[in-house]
Image (cartoon, rainbow, N blue to C red):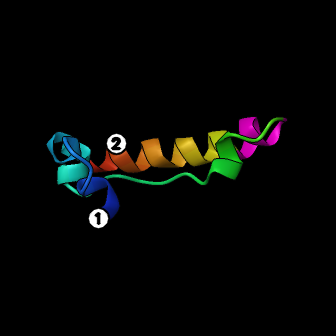
Amino acid sequence: LAAIKRRPGWDAVPAVRTGLVREIKSTYILQPGPAALTEGLSQLKALVREASAVS
């Protein structure tokens, strides 16, 4: 999060300001094949649930 905040303009993004930036490992969403659909989708779903609980 600190590295993102140092980037010009990123401090204006609400998720960055409030510390709600989350990471998904690239191997879960960028690799070819079914893992991106299964594990990547599971990771995204968990992050959406977390964000929904916060708001």
Element carrying mark 2: helix
Secondary structure under tag 1 reads: helix
Tell me what residue is drawn at x 76 percent, y 41 percent: 31
Q: Decide which of tag 2 and tag 1 comes sooner along the chain.
A: 1
Amino acid identity at mark 1 = Ala
Relative image position of residue 28 (x, y in whole percent):
68, 48
Which residue type carries mark 2?
Ser
Q: Position of residue 13 (x, y in %)?
A: 21, 40
Q: Which residue matches tag 1?
A: 2
Image quarter where the C terminus lies is: top left
Q: Nearer the viewer, residue 49 or 22?
A: 22
- How packed is label 1: few (under 14 Cα within 10 Å), some, or many (20 or more)? few
| Residue 18 seen in the current view | yes
Considering every residue shown, the one lying at the far front of the view is: 8
Task: Point out which mark residue 52 bears.
Answer: 2
**Residue 2, picture quadrant:** bottom left
Which image quadrant: the N terminus? bottom left
Separation of marks 2 and 1 at Cα, in angstroms: 24 Å
* Residue 21 in picture, x, y percent from top left: 35, 52
31 or 43: nearer the viewer:
31
Q: Is residue 10 left or right of residue 27?
A: left
Q: Residue visible at 19% across and 41% down? A: 9
Residue at position x 73%, y 35% in the image? 37
Which x, y percent locates residue 36?
Answer: 73, 39
Magenta residues span: 33-39
Viewer can see residue 1: no
